[in-house]
Image (spheres, rainbow, N blue to C red):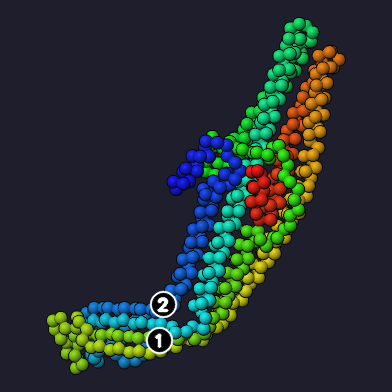
Amino acid sequence: MALLVFATAALQAEDLTLQQAIAAALGNYPSVRVSQEQMNAAAAGIRLAQTAYLPRVDTFAQINRATRNTYYGLLLPQTVIPGVDGVNANNLGTVWDSGLGILVSWQPFDFGLRAAHVASAAAAKDRAEAGVERSRYEVAVATANAYLTQIAAEQVTRAARAAAESWQTLRGSIRALVAAELRPGADEARVQAEQALAETQVAQAEEAVEVARAAVAQFTGMPTSDLNTKPGKMITDLPADASVALSADRNPIAREQNAAITEEQRKLDALGRTNYPQFSVQGLAAARGTGLETDGRRLGGLNGLAPTTQNYSVGLTLTFPAMDRFAIHEEEAQQSAVIRAQQAQYQVILKELEGKFQIAQATLAGARRVAANTPVAVSAARTALNQATARYRSGLAPIDDVAQAQRVLVQAEIDDALARLNVWRALLDVDTARGDIQPFVLEAGQ
C-alpha cells in the first residue's frame, strides 16, 4: 500500500505517460481485484477437494431421560419415531440413558473419484487465472483507449485556441482599418462573429478534455487535476510499419473460454466416476448406559447417566446406489451439452477476433494513407489563408474569403493532429485483437 501511495505521489509531480496510466489502472481498478479474489477462491477449492482423502471422524455423546416401552411390528425407514431397546411394558415411568461413541471412516480406494474432483477444482483455478488475465487485458485496453481519447481532445483544444487567437489578431487589424474608414464596419462585425464561434469551439473542446480525463480517472483512480498526458511521439510521428500475424487462441478472451471448456470436461469426468461402489473401512468404539433393568425394573438416582456397557467394531462397508445410474446418465447428457455449447462459443470468439483483426488492419492501412496526406492539406490551407489575407488587405477580396480560408486551415490542422493519433489508435486495435497491447505501449513510449 505504501508503494502504491508513493507511486501515485510521483505521478502527480509530472505528466502521466501511457505506461504509467495502465500500471495505475491495473493496480486500482476494482474488476481486476474481483477476478483476483475469484482465483483465490478457486485455489481454496482445490484444497477443499483434497480434504476428501482424509478419514472422516464422527463423535457422539447424548444424555436423555425417557420412557423405555418397546413394541412389536415394523416401520419403514424414517427419522421421527425412535427405535427403543427396553421391555414389553406400557407405562410413563422414565429412566436416564446415555451414549458415547466415535466412528472413523476412510475410503482406501474410490476408482479415481476424488482425483477427478481435485482435477475439476484445479481446472476451475486455471479458469479463474485466465479470468484475471482477461480482466487485466480489458482494463489495459480500455485505459489506453481513454488515454488516446484525452490526447485527441487536447489536440483539438490546442487547434481551437490557436484559431481563436488568430481571429483576435485579425479583429485588431480590421478594427484599425475600420477606424481609418478603409474598410466597412460590417467586416469587424463579421470577424467578431467568427471569433465568438471559435471561442465556442474552444469551450466545447475543453469540455471534451474534461470528459476524457474523467474516463482516465475512472480507471487509474487518480484525481482529474493530475491527469496531464505525456503523448510523446504519438502527436509527431507515426508508428513503424510492421507485419503482425494473428493467433486468436492466444487472446486472453479465447484462453479464458478454452479454460472454461476444460473445467466443464473435468466436471464430466468426475460425474462419470460417481456410479461406482464406495468402499469404506470403518472403526467404531461406543458405550451405553441406562437406568432400566432387563426385567423392567427402573433404577433410581443417577443410574444411566454414565455409560457402563462398551462395544467396538472394525469392518468394511460397501455402498452402491444402483438406481442412481439413471439420474447420472441424464446429468452426463446435460454436462455434455454444456461442453458442446462452450466449444461453440469458443469458435464464435475466434471468428470475432479474426474479424476485428482484419478490420483493424484495414483501418490501420487507411489511417496511414490519411496521415500521409494531411500535412499537404495543412500547407495548402495555410498558403490559401495568407493569400486571402493579402488580397483582403489590398482590397481585392471580401472578408468572407479570409473567414473561409481560416476555417479551412483550422479544420486541416485538427485533421492533421488527429490523423496521426488515428494511426496509433488503429495500431492499438490490431494489438487488441491479437491479445497483447504491450508492443503498442512500448513503441508509443519510446
Which residue in the rendered view is the most extreme toward the bottom? 295
Which residue in the rendered view is the most extreme toward the front? 446
The x, y position of residue 229, in whole percent, is 60, 37
Residue at 56% of width from left, 65% of height from top? 126
Q: Which residue is mark 2?
A: 54
Q: State the SS at label 2.
A: loop
Q: What's under tag 2, amino acid-wise?
A: Leu
**Position of residue 150 in the picture relative to residue 303 (left or right):** right
Quadrant (top left, top right, bottom left, bottom right) of the C terminus? top right
Would you place residue 226 above or below residue 51 in this image?
A: above
Which residue in the rendered view is the most extreme toward the left? 301
The x, y position of residue 150, in whole percent, is 63, 38
Q: Earlier in the sequence, mark 2 or mark 1?
A: 2
**Position of residue 68 in the picture relative to residue 232 (left or right):** left
Q: Is residue 201 visible?
A: no
Q: Quadrant of residue 303?
A: bottom left
